[in-house]
Image (cartoon, helix red, strand yellow):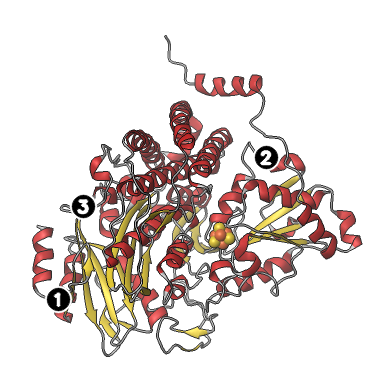
Amino acid sequence: MTYDPGAAMRNIVLRNLFRGPYTEPSPPVADEALKQLAASVNQAAMRRLGRSLSIREVDAGSCNGCELEIHALNNAIYDLERFGLRFVASPRHADVLLVTGPVTKNMREALERTYRATPDPKWVVAVGDCAISGGLFSGSYAVEGGIKGIIPVDLNIPGCPPTPEQLLRGLLALLS
Amino acid sequence: MSDAILHELMGAGRVVAAHRPWPRVEVDRAVWQLAAAHLKDGKLTCFGLWAESQEPPHVHLALLAETTHQVVVLTLACPDGRFPSIGAVHPPALRLERAIQDLHGLTAEGLPDSRPWLDHGRWTVRHPMKPTASAAQPLLPYAFLPATGDGLHQIPVGPVHAGIIEPGHFRFTANGETVVRLEPRLGYVHRGLESLMQGAEVGHGAKLAGRASGDSTVAYAIAFCKAAEAAAGIVVPPRALWLRALAAEIERIANHCGDIGAICNDASFTLLFMEFGVVRERVLRAARACFGHRLMMDFVVPGGVAADPSADSLIDLRSLRAYVAKQLKNLTQIYDTTASLQDRTVGTGIVSTELVHQYGAGGVVGRASGRTFDARRLPLQAPYDHLQFAVPVLKAGDVNARVWVRIQEVEQSLNLLDQLLGDLPDGPVCADANFSGMSGQGIGVVEGFRGDVLAWLRLDHGRIARCHLRDPSWFQWPLLEAAIEGNIVADFPLCNKSFNCSYAGHDL
Ligand code: SF4
């Protein structure tokens, strides 16, 4: 048999063509998230929701567990982009800030500046117990104890860390 | 030879009885400085350096004799709040001492770089680990190290990055495309974890340790629990040891698969990123079925593990094992035969063997540059003493070598899964871990996916009096600076990903 360096890659492409994508059906939108959004977002901003949205992720002192699961949203199984939600590299391109971590004192200014750099209208999603309330780190001299009070929060997605499915169900509320 | 040196150091001090499993020795300044000289000469490896703020304050220096795998902790009392700097003669200790100065207010005499490290001047207190912490004071702006010459320019990056990564600041000095100096500034993720440990119950301490660095939650929880169990003399039942190792190997497989894919992604080869992402996802789902949580947080508890996995989920692990093995083989073949990918990884970001030995760099970073150390090979690391596995070591020290060490480590971990599942002992999964009233000191070391995690703990009447966690990244971050030198700026993400140091584990 002759050596064929492209064989393995070709096999993958063919397999994916014939078997279809890895992507799983979308989970239902989280009711709780819908309620929260209805309460926090005004009508003008609401009209902009439901379309394609750009997300900027900000780690404000996370243990990196939340980041791992946010990363997973980009894998072929959850494939966040099919919903018109995509991660962007700059807050200046973002509609949504997805913030993790208890907001360390050392990150507070960076978070505030990122918020200011994001054009209006914008939405803030607190991801994980740390971002919502400080989680296990509340009470430390080095953290603010969550995002609330630093920048306005529109939606909380609890969990330590929230699973990709929980993240997806929460984020889909921004689109419905 | 290094063994003889450790014995000599031990003989020159007073051995502390209540410290397990490795000895701790109280020494004087002369012996402390002798140890520093041995570190400088490369006869011993710095395994950790931390302080305790009780009266009088102490500094502890963990030493490793590489060839014989002996570990000893030296302790120096600092009644006047000062100790001779190790970093003055042995640079790997520099940042650890800067952190000690920030947290405890002790002075490392002769420390050549005494800029604050974790303290950015934003905490509510100064020297937060001191019993009488003082009010915070504004700090001078951080002075980055200079680089001068014609045509040099600086590129500041972070702490908020373009990708979904942890916060840290990188200051590049470049000449055109070529990096002449990289200086990272860390500490943005400092959450005060060690101060939250103080006075906490052991069970709560394990949860905190499991959130030092989320990607290594199993490794940290095991290291912490080993230290606590050693301090209290609690014996963990065999089934729990096996299940812990199972979780640790699954953590290694999941992270390595994610990293290999992410490195390929930073070389713009998305196909492998996507394929490895699916492998990682399937591993995490199996972890959830077995251990109740995708990242396996809070599965490891003092005395053992939180729950016995169902028989079905353990059977499913075997098919997962076969699936990962098959995918790894196919995907590795693609990595190996794609010239455009190899073009980016081969010869990029080289770290020398001398440097990994000097810094005692563990994990993939060390083993891709010829350092054979793997904490699973240390004594008292059950169940690994019952298992067969190789420690893959390469010499090239480039991004490609770090990819290959990961690939080979996944293969080894898959073999370990087989062995662990094959002779999983019967019996309880948790000892009666009653810490109330217990006092003692313990040390635990675990080989996480990133390298050796060290936990040290002083238990005082059932409560944590002091717990120190040392991430492998402390001895890897400085080498990233060496790896990038002379490379182009655009290759930094690739080099950085191939290291994948922890920010959270380092900053705590
Ligand atoms: S919520 Fe949990 S996983 Fe997320 S950053 Fe906090 S401790 Fe880590």
In 3D space, how far apart are the residues under numbered discs 2 and 3 (Cα atoms)? 45 Å
Q: Which mark is residue B31?
A: 1
Which mark sits nearer the N-terminus, 3 or 1? 1
Subunit under mark 2? A
Q: Nearer the viewer, residue B228 or B218?
A: B228
Q: Nearer the viewer, mark 2 or mark 1?
A: 2
Task: Say if mark 2 contacts mark 1, CB within 8 Å.
Answer: no
Q: Is residue B486 left or right of residue A139?
A: left
Q: Nearer the viewer, residue A13 or B471?
A: B471
Give the residue type that dot 2 points to: Asp
In 3D space, how far apart are the residues under numbered discs 2 and 1 (Cα atoms)? 59 Å
Give the residue type that dot 1 points to: Val
**Residue assigned mark 2:** A79
Q: Nearer the viewer, mark 3 or mark 1?
A: 3
Q: Is residue A55 left or right of residue B466?
A: right
Count neighbours of disc 2 (C-alpha within 10 A) and say few if under 14, some if 14 to 19, many if 20 or more.
some
Residue pictured at 46% horizontal, 29% vertical: B319
- The answer to whether residue A11 of the structure is visible from this angle is yes
Residue pictured at 14% horizontal, 76% vertical: B31
Image coords of residue B377 (percent x, y):
24, 48
Count neighbours of disc 1 (C-alpha within 10 A) and say few if under 14, some if 14 to 19, many if 20 or more.
some
Give the residue type that dot 3 points to: Pro
Ligand 1 positioned in quadrant: bottom right
